[in-house]
Image (cartoon, rainbow, N blue to C red):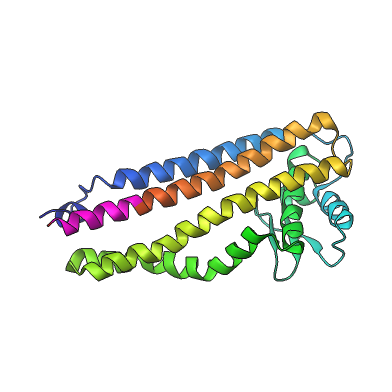
Amino acid sequence: MGYFGPVFYGMDPTVLLLVAGMVLSLVASARLKRIFSVYSRISSASRMTGAQTAQRILSMAGLSDVQVCAVSGHLTDHYDPRSRTVRLSESVYGQTSLAAVGVAAHECGHAVQHQVRYAPLRWRSAIVPIANFGSGLSWPVFLVGLVTSIRPFLYLGITLFLGAVLFQLVTLPVELNASARALRLLTDGGILAEQEIPGARKVLRAAALTYVAALASSVLQLIRLLILAGGRDRE
C-alpha cells in the first residue's frame, strides 16, 4: 500500500511537517500582535502620526509622486508599486505610537526600494505571477500523480511548488532591507529619539519573524512533497 493508504486514511506521518509549519506561522503572528499591541500604547515624543511619518520620509527621499492613504483592517499596511501608494491600516495611519511610526517607515522603505530599483524587490515582483500560478496548481497536480502513480505529475507538482518557496525566499531580504532602511530614515529624519528606536526595532523584528516563519512553513511543505514522492517511487 505504501503512501497511498496513509494519505487517504489520515495516517500520513508527513502531516506533522504541515502542522509544524502552521504552528510556526501562528506563533510568529501572535508574537507580532502582542508586540504591536505593547508599542501601540506608547506614543512617540514627536507626536507624529503614521501618515505624517510616511509623508516626512517620502519628502526626505524625494518621492513627491508617492501617495499615502488609509486602508481598512489591522496590520494590512503595504506599498503598492503599481499605483505608487503607501497604504496604512487604521491602527497606523492616524496613530502616534512607536508601533505606528515604525510600520509606516517600513512601508516607505519599500517605496525607496522601488525608487532605487532594489534588485530583490524587482525579483519578487517578477516571481509573483509564477508563485501564484504554482501555489494554486501544485497540490492538485501532485495529488493526481500520487493517486495515479504517474511520476511526471509528482515532479511537476513539486516544481510548481518551488515557485512559492522561491517567492518566500526572495521576500525575506526585501522585508529585512525595508526595516533597516526604516530605522535609518527614522533616525536621520529626527522622527524618533535615540531611546525610542529600540521599540520601533522590536516591532519591525517581530514583523520580520512572520516572513521567516512563512519561509520555514513553505520549506517544510516542500520536504513533505519530496517525502511523499519518494515513498511513491519506492512502491
Residue name at image x 22 percent, y 48 percent: 12
Image x and y of residue 48, in percent: 87, 44
Q: Is residue 230 magenta?
A: yes
Q: Is residue 30 magenta?
A: no
Q: Main secondary structure of the magenta part?
A: helix
Query: Which image quadrant for residue 17?
Result: top left
Please say whether residue 29 is visible from this viewpoint. yes
Task: In the rendered view, tell whether residue 125 sits above or below residue 8.
Answer: below
Residue at position x 89%, y 57% in the image: 59
At horizontal 73% and vertical 37% (from top left) the residue drawn is 200
**159 sits to left or right of 30:** left
Query: Is 175 left or right of 97, judged from the image as shown?
Result: left
Question: Most extreme residue toward the top, as rendered?
Answer: 195
Quadrant for the C terminus, please. Answer: bottom left
Residue 100 in view in this figure = no
- Picture coordinates of residue 1, whole percent (x, y): 10, 55
What stretch of residues is rendered in magenta? 223-234
Find residue 214 and report its horizontal and vertical position in percent: 49, 49
Query: Foreground residue, 220 or 16?
Result: 220
Seen from this angle, which residue lies furthest left?
Answer: 1
Which residue does the image show at 84% across and 46% down from the upper left?
Answer: 49
